[in-house]
Amino acid sequence: MGPETLSHVLRQLPIPQDARLLVGPHTGDDAAVYLLDEETALIVTVDFFTPVVDDPYTFGQIAAANALSDVYAMGGRPLLCLNLVGFPTCLPVEVLGEILRGGSDKVAEAGAILAGGHTLEDDEPKYGLAAVGLVHPEGLWRNSTARPGDVLILTKPLGTGVINTAAKVDMAPPDAMAAAVDLMRTLNAAACHALRDVRVNACTDVTGFGLLGHAAEMAEASGVTLVLRAEAIPVLEGARELGAMGMFPGGAYRNRDWVKGRLAAGGVDDTDLLILCDPQTSGGLLAAVPGDQVELALARLGERGVPGRVIGEAVPRRDALLAILA
Ligand code: CO
Ligand code: CO
């Protein structure tokens, strides 16, 4: 669902008031966080969607990596997961078995426990997880605490949305699709572990609202403006070309329309803007770290094989939440 529609509906719900709720619904953060005691906070999140690839095992892996990502985006360690499944009676049950095997393998890779779940009959397959994680309250990464001077690091390239959409009509080059699949099923665990070695002021993950959508949420919640350098933002090979051919998913246009009034973007063409708004499945972490932590952060990410890139910085709030430099 687009950010505009969603925030309109969510505004009508009561805002929970409890001092133990460290992160609630009002900052558009990745997960809810509940303080258990001085040293422990509980992270709770849920995510599920329809298949983005044909192979059921791979879909299971991707959906699980995507759901677990919100735990990592809070700086946490996944503990316990439950499957959420929708499945049509017209498909062979072996397909469901493969989806669940993919999810189970990914949860095991994350060092968490898959402890059950819920299944219902549905017109098309849907899969994902409810996940619970733990974090020390002082090590909690909100999306609402970026400060002027922070440097922005992105840990995965963009472009999975446009490549997936092209693949549905057999237009994605096999190499581009293989790279996208690899990226989508990669846990954000290594990125999270690497960044836990440095001071992180704020963090989120890049998913359905695209880089600019999630960056705008971080800027708004933090009271800063985020300045991004278009040139520095990593993009999967082939994604721009497919975008120029009009292969963007509907969500990219919805995200762009939402972000447009919050953005100063001189000299960035429409295709590049749509890439920055491309909805990502299981995208990377977007972290705001103090300037003196950047070198260490990039080194730690590199040691763990994570392609972290500096893509911009946070500055005191201007008129627009986001600025893109061409
Ligand atoms: Co998230
Ligand atoms: Co989420």
Image (spheres, helix red, strand yellow):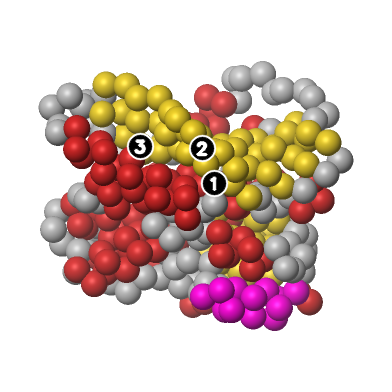
Task: Inspect the image, locate mark 3, and give the three-letter code of the amino acid beneath it.
Answer: Tyr
Q: Does the magenta stretch include residue 313?
A: no
Residue highlighted by disc 1:
112
Residue found at x 78% / y 42%:
40
Q: Left or right of 1: which side holds 174?
A: left
Mark 3 lies on a secondary structure that is strand
Q: Left or right of 167: which side holds 216?
A: right
The residue range painted magenta reads 293-305
Q: How many labels sit on residues?
A: 3
Q: Which of marks 3 and 1 is in front?
A: 1
Q: Is residue 300 magenta?
A: yes
Q: How far apart are marks 3 and 2 (CA)?
A: 13 Å
- Looking at this view, name the residue that lies furthest to the right: 38
- Which x, y percent locates residue 305? 51, 75
280 w.r.t. 84: above or below:
below
218 w.r.t. 293: above or below:
above
Residue highlighted by disc 3:
127
User: Mark 3 Cα within 10 Å, few/some/many (few <14, many 20+)?
Assistant: many
Q: How far apart are marks 3 and 1 (CA)?
A: 18 Å
Which corner quadrant of the image does residue 163 belong to?
Answer: bottom left
User: Mark 2 Cα within 10 Å, few/some/many (few <14, many 20+)?
Assistant: many
Which corner quadrant of the image does residue 131 belong to?
Answer: top right
- Which x, y percent locates residue 284? 51, 60
Residue found at x 39% / y 57%:
185
Residue found at x 27% / y 21%:
121
Task: Inspect the image, locate mark 1, and give the three-letter code of the amino acid beneath it.
Answer: Ala
Which corner quadrant of the image does residue 229 belong to?
Answer: bottom right
Mark 2 lies on a secondary structure that is strand
Is residue 39 among the parts visible in the rendering?
yes
Q: Earlier in the sequence, mark 3 or mark 1?
A: 1
Residue highlighted by disc 2:
81
